[in-house]
Amino acid sequence: MTKSYQELLNRKRREYGTKFSPRELSKKFIPFYENENRIKVLFSSGEIKRGRVGVTTGWVPAFILMLTSRSRASSWILSNKDKIIIN
């Protein structure tokens, strides 16, 4: 089952109305959010982590890196400063 970025935006707009903003959703992570494949990320801090792309709740959501399939949350926020590592 693939996720839809557009459905995410539509759901958040319905939920939060004019308060909603996608400004923290870095576009380069959209394909990985949708296909749910594991990726390796070089964070701006210099750390490298591997996981799946998830999204936070709230009216200004952000993409996050979920390290395991059992993860329910993550402190690894994905931004434009972070790099996707292609093996």
Image: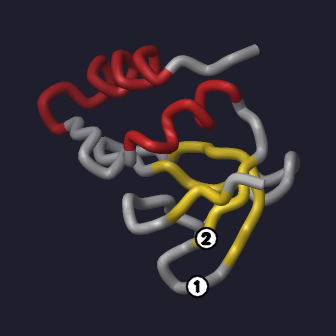
Q: Position of residue 29 (x, y in %)?
A: 51, 43
Q: Position of residue 73 (x, y in %)?
A: 66, 57
Q: Is residue 73 visible?
A: no
Q: In which quadrant is the C terminus drawn?
A: bottom right
Q: Residue furthest front?
A: 87
How was the colour assigned to the protein in this rendering?
secondary structure
Q: Secondary structure at mark 2?
A: strand
* Left or right: where 16 falls relative to 40: left
Does residue 47 show up?
yes
Marks 2 and 1 sit apart, C-alpha to C-alpha, by 6 Å
Circles 2 and 1: CB atoms closer than 8 Å: yes
Q: Which residue is mark 2?
A: 42
Dot 1, how many residues are within 10 Å of its Cα: few (below 14), some (14-19), or many (20+)? few
The residue under label 1 is 46
Q: Identify the amino acid type marked 1.
A: Gly
Local SS, label 1? loop
